[in-house]
Image: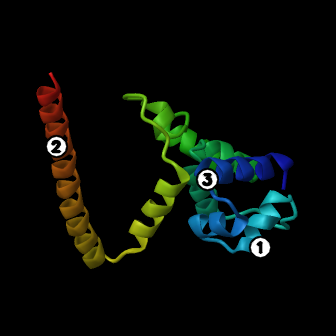
Amino acid sequence: MPIAFAQLVKQAKDTYGAETAKTFARVIRVSGGTVSRYLHNKTTHPPGTDVCLRIARAGELSPARVLRAAGKSEVAELLDALYGLTVPTAVAQPRHRARRTTPAERRLIDQWRRFTPEYRRLASTIMEVFLEQSLRDRSDSTLQGHATDLTET
């Protein structure tokens, strides 16, 4: 495996915000040992196309770039032929400059994805209640601040 693949895996791991190879392994659905072998360029056979695509998604990398680094140029060429130059969606179609998702936010998203649909509905309901209360609290504190300003003048 070319060293470029190891560098891309490291870049993807860092971009994702995974602190350990084991954490990143869960994200791309392989073993921790497999990610360690990728990072240290010790793998004996290339990863599957599905793993390459999960690495690209987690690291916000071009799928074709990851596929080529993994020795899967034919698949990368097919992607390019079907969809044009393949780059991450955020790069290909910038709508506005959004802030990057933090590692803590990504962990919450990963946890959310592991919920069953029923638990997602329950969690959504709880989050809506907390959000409403948070907005009320914020509104109340703003009103109290204005009342204090009026009494001090």
In x, y percent, where is residue 90?
A: 47, 37
At label 1, the amino acid type is: Gly
Which residue is located at x 20 percent, y 51 percent?
A: 137
- Asked if residue 27 lies left or right of residue 105, the reply is right
Whether residue 73 appears in this view of the structure is no
Q: Residues within 10 Å of mark 1 (few under 14, many from 20)?
A: few
Residue occupied by mark 1: 33
- Specify the label residue 139 is tagged with: 2
Which residue is located at x 17 percent, y 55 percent?
A: 132
At label 3, the amino acid type is: Gly
27 w.r.t. 73: above or below: below
Along the line of sight, the residue nearer the viewer: 95 or 53: 95
**Quarter holding residue 133:** bottom left
- Could you tell me if the residues under marks 3 and 2 are in contact, i.e. CB atoms within 8 Å? no
In x, y percent, where is residue 123?
A: 28, 70
SS assignment at label 2: helix
- Specify the label residue 5 is tagged with: none
Residue occupied by mark 3: 17
Q: CA distance from mark 1 to mark 2?
A: 50 Å
Along the line of sight, the residue nearer the viewer: 128 or 136: 136
| The furthest residue to the top | 153
Q: CA distance from mark 3 to mark 1?
A: 18 Å
- Asked if residue 99 lies left or right of residue 41, the reply is left
If the image is split into quadrants, where does the C terminus sit? top left
In x, y percent, where is residue 85?
A: 55, 34
In x, y percent, where is residue 143?
A: 13, 38
- Asked if residue 3 lies left or right of residue 138, the reply is right
SS assignment at label 1: helix
Q: Residues within 10 Å of mark 3 (few under 14, many from 20)?
A: many
**Quarter holding residue 86:** top right
SS assignment at label 3: loop
